[in-house]
Amino acid sequence: MSLGLKVVKGMKDILPDEIPGWYFVEEHLKSIALAYGYQEIRMPILEQTELFKRAIGEVTDIVEKEMYTFTDKGGESLTMRPEGTAQSVRLALENSLLRNQSQRLWYMGPMFRRENPQKGRYRQFYQFGIEAFGLEGPDVDVEQILMMARLWRNVGLSDKIVLKLNSLGTIQERAKYREALIEYYKKFARDIGAKDKKLMLDEDSQRRLLTNPMRILDSKNPEVIEINKDAPILLDFLGTESKHHFETIQAMLKDLGVAFEVDSRIVRGLDYYTHTVYEWVTTHLGSQGTVCAGGRYNGLVSLMGGPETPSVGFALGMERLLMLLQDNQLIPAKSVIDIYIVGVGEKGERKAMSFAEEIRQQFPTLHVLNNCGGGSFKSQFKRADKSGAKFAFILGDDEVANNQVTIKSLREEIPQQTKSQEEALAFLKDCFI
Ligand code: ATP
Ligand code: MG
């Protein structure tokens, strides 16, 4: 490019070729949400920085390192949203959606995190998310798992994705677990434990030991993964009620025929989760294998100043879903253009304009591309072919003089036919409707 200007690192242009895949994903996600009675919300990109700091927690990857935060001209600190849950809570509280009622909400849109870009990890990426407020579960937890199980079935991915499930219990139970974890990890910490250990926590984990030790379980460093193998397990710290919640979910999933694995390493990166947490994971996308992640976050609404409100939701990474569909050739090839209008000569070009309008009027779902800009019959025909259209409708001097149109099939070996314009419209009805 002449000025050398480029798209921002980690952000991507989405080009026309990729759009059929995006439509496919968006339509499937939307229809799942509607099928389960969820209602759409649309939220702004910018929020007050404080919202995410409070809701997500200061000692998380997102808040510590990944947020796009700036001071606007009025001196206010704003952040480009890194995720949608905190925002949904803000929206629900601000608009009194939680007063004596439950809510099932969904949203779709771009999120921003300043991470190291790689396959399946971008600085602007798209999430589809749902949040249910005011429902204690475990039935609604299961409902949300069913939604995704249905999505995988609908798009043909059931055998590529597995459900990994865990429970984080209550905040109190987690506090006890935290103590046990700290005790365990101390043995692998430079300044606190023995120095001659073969395995050591890395700097990041060492820092987390004092701030948020559960995050160490999430580490992707091989040495830390080794240490984690013998770490205490959260499930051993659950009380009777939490156990019951978790067992009921498992029993319901079994009844419904949804396969899952209990995986005690699933702790999720965010502070606000309680009880159920899960990830839908594929082995087909390398280390970016988590396509969808969610769980229950009963403490968040009250943390944000609202009434005690049981809440549960998930977020799905739309690029990862799209990549998985592409890799498995599951996106149906759609011809974007149905009919290409070729108008030759002054009269032909003028007629092309009005005839294209007539078709759009009568067949609002057809995609009609008018050549525009003139050119010889040959050059227009080349463009018609390139457009992927099924038919070219040709209007030259002869056709205009006789109120006719010549129809040429661009995909099948059918001889071209000249018809009256009325017959041509009837022909379209036969072909497409
Ligand atoms: P990861 O462990 O891969 O960083 P996460 O725990 O940060 O994921 P969540 O905050 O739970 O992710 O977001 C839900 C989903 O959004 C993820 O499972 C993933 O599919 C997608 N996602 C998260 N961050 C990115 C990103 N930077 N680029 C693309 N997709 C992402
Ligand atoms: Mg992350």
Image (spheres, rainbow, N blue to C red):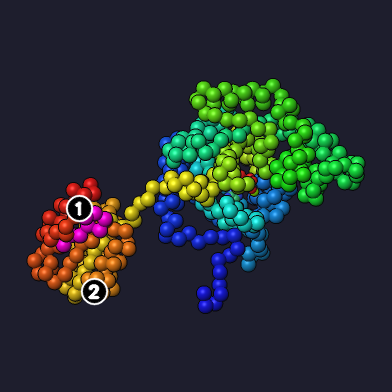
Mark 1–mark 2 CB contact (< 8 Å): no
Residue 127, image x, y percentages: 53, 48
Whether 294 is drawn above or below 116: the answer is: above
The one of 324 and 367 positioned closer to us in this rendering: 324
The quarter holding residue 182 reads: top right
Q: Viewed as shown, does residue 317 lie left or right of 274?
A: left
The residue at 16%/59% (across/down) is 416
Residue type, mark 1 in image: Leu
Residue 153, image x, y percentages: 45, 36
The residue at 20%/52% (across/down) is 428
Inter-mark Cα distance, 1 to 2: 25 Å
Question: Which residue sits furthest left?
Answer: 402
Res 213 visible: yes
Name the residue tied to disc 1: 428
State the SS at label 1.
helix
Residue 141, image x, y percentages: 56, 31
Name the residue tied to disc 2: 376
Residue 219, image x, y percentages: 72, 44
Q: Is residue 407 magenta?
A: yes
The one of 80 and 184 positioned closer to us in this rendering: 184
Residue type, mark 2 in image: Ser
N-term-proximal mark, 1 vs 2: 2
Distance from mark 2 CB to nearest ligand 1 atom below 8 Å: no
Q: Viewed as shown, does residue 313 lie left or right of 39?
A: right
The one of 335 and 105 positioned closer to us in this rendering: 335
Q: Please state the extent of the stretch shown in magenta in the rendering.
A: 406-413
The quarter holding residue 249 reads: top right
The residue at 23%/61% (across/down) is 392
The residue at 52%/78% (across/down) is 2
State the SS at label 2.
loop
